[in-house]
Image (cartoon, rainbow, N blue to C red):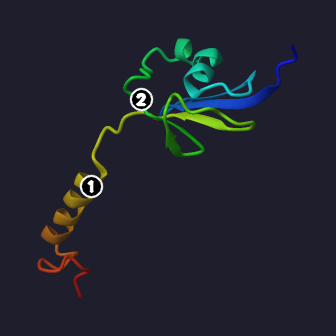
């Protein structure tokens, strides 16, 4: 039986280091199997597939989704800060410093 192999990449990045591993898997392989076969879990023991979200080309997916030829599987790190909270704090600071209108939040004149 001649099994068709496809090429996929598995990507994971930290602030100071990143890994992009190219692997060859059978057509119809799921995301979880690709990640396990890539060896990235051994390189980064902090990855927990029960907690970390994954995606293909920046679109979140389930671990059970199948991959296609030339897909890039990305393993996402959890956010360390809530982006909405950061923007809210920045807006409050601008109001306090007089850089923003205290009522509307728009730019001060």
- Is residue 32 shown above or below 14? above
* Label 1 neighbour load within 10 Å: few <14, some 14-19, many 20+: few
Q: Nearer the viewer, residue 54 or 21?
A: 54
C-alpha distance separating marks 2 and 1: 21 Å
Quadrant for residue 67, please give it.
top right
Residue 95 locus on image (x, y percent): 16, 71
Give whichever of discs 2 and 1 has the lower sequence position: 2
Q: Residue at image x 50%, y 18%? A: 44
Q: Secondary structure at mark 2?
A: loop
Which marked residue is nearer to the observer: mark 2 or mark 1?
2
Q: Which mark is residue 84?
A: 1
Q: Which mark is residue 35?
A: none
Q: Residue at image x 37%, y 34%? A: 78
Q: Residue at image x 64%, y 15%? A: 37
**Would residue 47 appear left or right of 6 to someone viewing this image?**
left
Circle 2 residue: 52
Q: Residue furthest front?
A: 1
Whether tag 2 and tag 1 are in contact, CB under 8 A, the answer is no
Q: Secondary structure at mark 1?
A: helix
Residue 100 locus on image (x, y percent): 21, 76
**Would residue 43 appear left or right of 96 to someone viewing this image?**
right
Q: Residue at image x 50%, y 38%? A: 61
- Quarter of the picture containing the C terminus is bottom left
**Would residue 55 appear left or right of 108 to someone viewing this image?**
right
Q: Residue furthest bottom?
A: 109
* Label 2 neighbour load within 10 Å: few <14, some 14-19, many 20+: few
Quadrant for residue 26, please give it.
top right
Q: Nearer the viewer, residue 30 or 72?
A: 30
């Amino acid at each position: 039986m001649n099994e068709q192999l496809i090429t996929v990449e598995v990507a994971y990045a930290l602030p100071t280091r990143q890994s992009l591993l190219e692997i060859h898997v059978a057509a119809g392989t799921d995301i979880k199997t690709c990640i396990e076969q890539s060896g990235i879990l051994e390189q980064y023991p902090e990855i927990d597939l029960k907690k970390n979200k994954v995606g293909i080309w920046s679109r979140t997916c389930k671990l059970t989704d199948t991959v296609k030829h030339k897909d890039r599987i990305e393993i996402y790190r959890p956010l360390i800060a809530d982006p909405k909270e950061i923007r809210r704090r920045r807006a409050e600071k601008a109001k306090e410093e007089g850089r923003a209108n205290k009522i509307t939040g728009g730019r001060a004149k």
